[in-house]
Image (tube, rainbow, N blue to C red):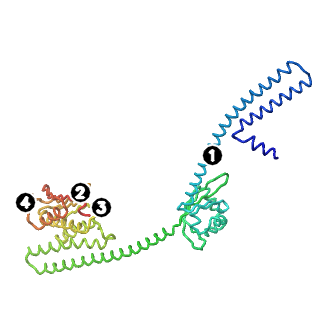
Amino acid sequence: MMLKNLFKRYVLKTNYLPSRFSFMFALVGITGVLLIDRIIHLRYGDVEVIDIGPLTLGILYTLAMTVVIYLLLKYMLSIVKVTEASYHLLEQREKESLRLFNFALDNSADAIYWFTFDGKFYYVNDAASYMLGYKKEELLGMDLWEMDHNFTSDQAQAFLLEIKEVKRATFETTQTKKDGKVIPIEVSANYFAHEGKEFICAFGRDISERRDYQTAIEEANSELKRSISEKEMLLKEVHHRVKNNLEIISSLLSMQYRRIDDSAMRLILQESKSRIHTMSLVHEFLYKSEKLSEIDLDGYVTQLVTDIVSLYTEGQSDIKLCIYVEKLKFSTDASIRLGMILHELCVNTIKYAYNGIDEKRLSINLEQEDEILHLCVEDNGNGVKDIKELYESNSLGVQLIKIICEDQLDGEVNFLSEDGLRCDIYFPYKAVI
């Protein structure tokens, strides 16, 4: 044993292996040649060819082989050193990568744990230990169902097998900390195999704060909805009262209308009453609407024009109404302005357009063309002889139309008298929302 250890220590030492091995080879070779030569001398006696030839040849051959073997071993040693250096470098890099990998795992914001398919912990990182309040050694001695009470032993194992089938799964559950506190967890689980073994790798995140935020947001939303509902009720009540007040004013005008014999004054009161009804109708539609920020514009225009025709013809109208209103959103003020424009145009049409006309027609169209709204009110009446007089008219109705269109809606008004009177009004959509 002692000789064996000395041989390993001095003869097989890596750095001196070529020279020592070559020396040993030369020593053994020469000794062997001398021994054979001696045996030949003892067997055959003194013969010249045997005395000189085999000995010299054997020694030269042994020395030559020694040099060859030395060079081969020297070359092999250089390769071994390069390989050994590469191996050590690779080993250091692998250790560094493993150190960084372990550092990343342990400092992850998420808890990471590996499970075997019998539900036992195989690996946990520092985040899992911190989140659950256990030491790593304690967790590695536990089962999944001891931490997650939503599972029994059989259910946990069956669930892990389900994850294996689908490869990955994301779900929410609860886990129990060491102090008994139950916390909500969002889990992302994945199946993988490593070194012939199968695992489920789970990433867990404590979502207690998120749940608290969600609860706070839901409570705030509930309170906001309640507050909005109350304000909507109050706003509906305001619209209802405004409508009632306008109707009271309209009723007072009606009483005054019946007490006056002057036809001109009666016409003024009738037009005032009609304008008030135009404003009142907006509040009535808003009161009935589910959305207080907008009204049914088509219904409002149809109702308004029908009421105006009925009022000024005392319910005996034979005017055919053709109304088309595109589905648009108008603010309350814009709806009233539109109503006032339609009121003045319709009243003027009813009062002046149809003398001697049997088949009376009144068309109203409101459409959007890109970002511009186009309102067209057209009748088949007598029209006007001089369209310039209409532009220069000082009547209250025409002045109202111009003021509302040009000053309040930033639009323009065009009249055309051809087979009746046509009024085209253009204004930007942004002026009415």
Task: Examine the image and state in which quarter residue 290 appears.
Answer: bottom left
Is disc 2 in contact with disc 1, using a CB cutoff of under 8 Å? no
Residue 51, horizontal then vertical, whole percent: 85, 21
N-terminal-most mark, 3 or 2: 3
Is disc 3 in contact with disc 2, using a CB cutoff of under 8 Å? no
SS at mark 2? strand
Q: In this rendering, is residue 318 above or below 255?
A: above
Name the front one of labels 3 and 1: 1
Q: Which residue is mark 2?
A: 372
Lateral position of residue 38 relative to residue 195, left or right: right
N-terminal-most mark, 3 or 4: 3
> Amino acid type of disc 3?
Lys
Q: Is residue 155 visible?
A: no
Q: Which residue is mark 4?
A: 389
Q: Nearer the viewer, residue 43 or 311?
A: 43
Q: Residue at x 61, y 71 (%)?
A: 178
